Amino acid sequence: MSEVLENIEESNEEKIKSDIFNISKMIIEDDNMIQVLKMASKVSRVNTTVLVQGETGVGKEGIAKYIHYNSLRKEESFVAINCGAIPKNLIESVLFGYEAGSFTGANKQGKIGVFELADKGTIFLDEVGELSQEVQVELLRVLQEHEIERVGGLKPVKVDVRIIAATNRNLKEMIGENLFREDLYYRLSVFPINIPPLRERKGDIVPLIKFFTEEINEMYGLKSYFSDEALDCLKYYSWPGNIRELKNIVERSVVMSDNKIIYGKNLPEYISDSYKGNEMEFSISNLSIKGCNLKDIIQTIEEEIIEDAMRRYGNIRMTAKALGVNPSTLVRKRKKYNKEN
C-alpha cells in the first residue's frame, strides 16, 4: 500500500517540470480542438470542477494539465491518478490516506492520500467511472464539504483541491444502470469538456505526425520523414486508439524503416489497406433539383463537394491540394457559400 502511494508521489514530482515544458508544445491546429482549447482556457481562470470526456487516447490528461498550468494554482501540485488502475481494495486508502495501524501492513506512521498530496493544487481523476459506489460517496463529500477522512481516522481533514475528472464512459448511462451516482455526476460536470476523437479532427493528424517524427528522430539520431503518400494513408485511417495509437505507429514506422523516407508500403497493412479505394466520392442521386436552374444545381454540387473534402482533409491547404485548386480560390468559394474558413 505504501509503495503505491510512494510511486504516485515520485511520478508526479518527476512530471512537474516536463509537464510545464510540454504544455507549450501542444499540437492543436484543427478547428474542433481549437474550440476545446478555448473552453479550457476560460475555465482555467476559475476553480470550477471540470469533467473531461472522450475516447481513450484523445488527450484528456493533456487538457487537464493545460487547465492547471494556466490557473492560479499553477505553482502548486498537479497530481494525476488513474482510478481504474488501482485495486478496488486500495483505492480509498490511495485517495484519502490512512491512519497508523488502520489495516494489516499499514505504515506505522500512517500515510496521506493523493487529495492531501494535491492540497492547494489540482487533482486529476482519470477513469472516474471506475470508482465504486462507496468511494463515490467519499468523493461527493470532498466536493460538498472540502474535506476528507483518512481510512481508520476519526476526524475530517480540510483540503483545498481543484478536481478535474475524466472518463471514456457514458456516465449518464451508468446512472440509469445504478453504477454511478447522479448527484456526483452533476457535481463533477459543472463545466464539461468533450474532446473529439482523432478521426473528427483530421487537421491535427499531420502536425502530430511531424511532431512525433521529430521527437523520435532526435531520440534515436535519425532523419526519417513520411512521404506525402504515407501521410495521406495515415490521414484516412480512423485511429480507434487516437493520439496514443498514432504516436505508436509513427515510432514503429521510423524505427523499422530502412530508408530515410517512409512510404505507404512501410506502414502496417491494416492502415494502408484502409486507404485503398477510399477516394472521394460524391453522389447526386439524393439531390433535389426540382425547380432549380443549371447554375443553382452546379453551385449546390460544388458546395457539397467542397464541404465533404473539408471534413475529410481538415484544413484549407490539404483540401485545396486534393481538389486541385489554389487555397485562395477555396477560401473565396467558401466565403461565397457563407462557410467559415
Image: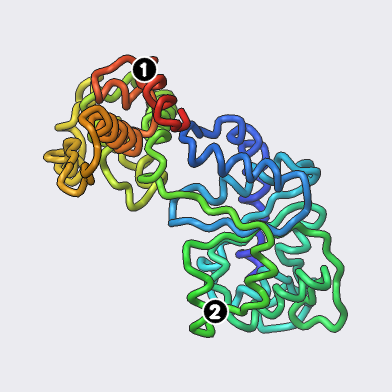
- Seen at 79% across and 41% down, the residue is 75
* CA–CA distance in space, label 1 to label 2: 48 Å
Relative to 108, residue 205 above or below: above
Q: Earlier along the polypeptide chain: callout 1 or callout 2?
A: 2
Relative to 201, residue 191 above or below: below
Q: Nearer the viewer, mark 1 or mark 2?
A: 1
Residue 53 rendering spot, x and y as whole percentages: 53, 58
- Seen at 78% across and 53% down, the residue is 47
The N terminus sits in image quarter: bottom right
- Seen at 19% across and 39% down, the residue is 282
- Local SS, label 2: helix
Q: Nearer the viewer, residue 302 or 49?
A: 302
Indicate the quadrant where residue 52 lies. bottom right
Residue 287 visible at all: yes
- Farthest residue in the left direction? 277
Residue 219 rendering spot, x and y as whole percentages: 43, 28
Residue named by callout 1 = 327
Residue 78 rendering spot, x and y as whole percentages: 69, 50
- Seen at 67% across and 45% down, the residue is 67
Q: Nearer the viewer, residue 90 or 325?
A: 325
Describe residue 339's horizontal placement relative to residue 253 as left or right.
right
Residue type marked 1:
Pro
Residue named by callout 2 = 175
Relative to 302, residue 156 above or below: below
Relative to 5, residue 264 above or below: above
Residue type marked 2:
Ile
Residue 256 visible at all: no
Q: Nearer the viewer, residue 121 or 216?
A: 121
